[in-house]
Amino acid sequence: MGAIQALRGTRDILPEEVAYWQRVEAIARGVLDRAAYREVRSPLFEQTELFARGIGEATDVVGKEMYTFRDRGDRSVTLRPEGTAGIARAFIEHGLHARGTQRLWYGGAMFRYERPQAGRQRQFHQLGLELIGCAAPRADVETIAIATDILRALGLQRLRLQLNSVGDAADRQRYRRALIEYLTPYKADLDADSQGRLERNPLRILDSKDERTRAIVADAPSILDALGSESQAHFTAVQQQLSDLGIDFALDPCLVRGLDYYTHTAFEIQSDDLGAQATVCGGGRYNGLIEQLGGPVTPAVGWAIGIERLVLLLQELTPPPAIAPDLYVVSRGDRAEAQALVLAQKLRHAGFAVELDLSGSGFAKQFKRADRSGAIGCLVLGEEEAATDTLKLKWLPVQEQTTLPQAQLLATTAELHARLNSLRHQ
Ligand code: ATP
Ligand code: MG
């Protein structure tokens, strides 16, 4: 019988890689806390209709990528392909608009049926943020600044912020007509996907990856020329305030988010260190979403960072975060092993990270594993130590060794902590 493997587009994240994930999460949490954002957790699956209404039938996500199935009660259920629709539903369901501006963040798995490749999976993870209830350009800028803070705090340098405005619904309607008018004579030359989008979702043609389509799109009218005066003022303010914060950006009039509820600011943060999947963060304003889902008219802005892509970058740039115990316990012989088990437990209760060698193998092999573990101290219990209730304490980085009563070690844990710290930072 063949061994069962993980499904295509899903992967296991093993401990060495998890260390990177935890670093991302810890740094992001710090930045978000300091900006007064609070975590929310919404379900991993929702009624299919939430995404159909909230993301839009004409998008790739809803049209081609959703994991949709009927549950045992014959309801159509979908694994969440992104986080915003669920948060918007929760905002409405819990009447959060009554509590003033909401600064929320979330993290977790998302599901899209895509063609798997590096940085593109079927189960992937996002960290996202939503600032709901504020229409001011400052809100757009605050969220962008938080994304850049997180990425910079992680040590990423070669980042590019691409910025655009997709205007309000009226601007988009006007632009949509101009775009269809411009593209229609070229219809036969567009790639097949773009031909299909011409009537349904022509803005999406702007970010086609097909070369011939791109050449045609290069001379298309710019959405920035179609903005009404209010949209123009909003966009100008966003650019000014980004400059005030020293955040560089480039305008990209072809940057249109795939999701229909976006209005005004759209942005992406890309990295020159990633290949084809260059975008680590995508976001923008979505003033139309909450109303479209049956809630009160509510302005909002947010973004999502793809954690897999971020971790790929970090693995290139930085050594793996160390995951080593403070102390490694080596023992041999029945009595020594029994004492070592108790000692390790007491040391953990005193705040040390302790790895107990359970192999029962010879001392030489256990010492080798102690070295490889990265531990600072190695505790050794053999038959002799067991008979006298003592142990050997070896400081591995300096190859120093003392013998002392077990009770003494447990009575002087403050000194042990101090010595560990000084050796760790040598
Ligand atoms: P793309 O153009 O790369 O498909 P998208 O526009 O579909 O991206 P968003 O919906 O804006 O992406 O999601 C935000 C971020 O989530 C992306 O910038 C990316 O980092 C990450 N992401 C999206 N889809 C995937 C996926 N299938 N696998 C891994 N990460 C993903
Ligand atoms: Mg996509």
Image (cartoon, rainbow, N blue to C red):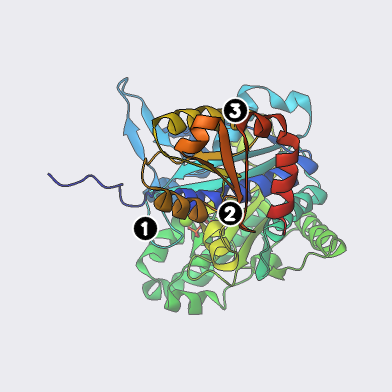
When the figure is inspected, residue 81 is found, relative to residue 239, above or below; the finding is above
Q: Nearer the viewer, mark 2 or mark 1?
A: 2
Query: How far apart are labels 2 and 1 at the CA level?
Result: 30 Å
Identify the residue under disc 3.
346
Whether 46 is drawn above or below 364: the answer is: above
Looking at the image, is 408 positioned above or below residue 233?
above
Label 1 residue SS: loop
Say which of marks 3 and 1 sits in front.
3
- 279, 330: nearer the viewer: 330
Task: Report helix, strand or loop for mark 3.
Answer: helix
Locate residue 409, reporting x and y percent.
66, 34
Task: Inspect the image, locate mark 2, and give the three-letter code of the amino acid beneath it.
Answer: Ala
Dot in front, 3 or 2: 3
Mark 2 highlights which residue?
A: 322
Which x, y percent locates residue 190? 40, 72
Q: Earlier in the sequence, mark 3 or mark 1?
A: 1
Residues tagged 3 and 1 counted as in contact (Cβ below 8 A): no
**Residue at x 43%, y 78% (from the top left corner):** 212
Residue closer to the observer: 288 or 164: 164
Residue 222 location, x and y as percent?
64, 70
Q: Which residue is mark 1?
A: 116
Name the quarter where the C terminus is drawn: bottom right
Identify residue type, mark 1. Pro
Q: Can see residue 157?
A: yes
Residue at 52%, 74% (x, y): give it: 217
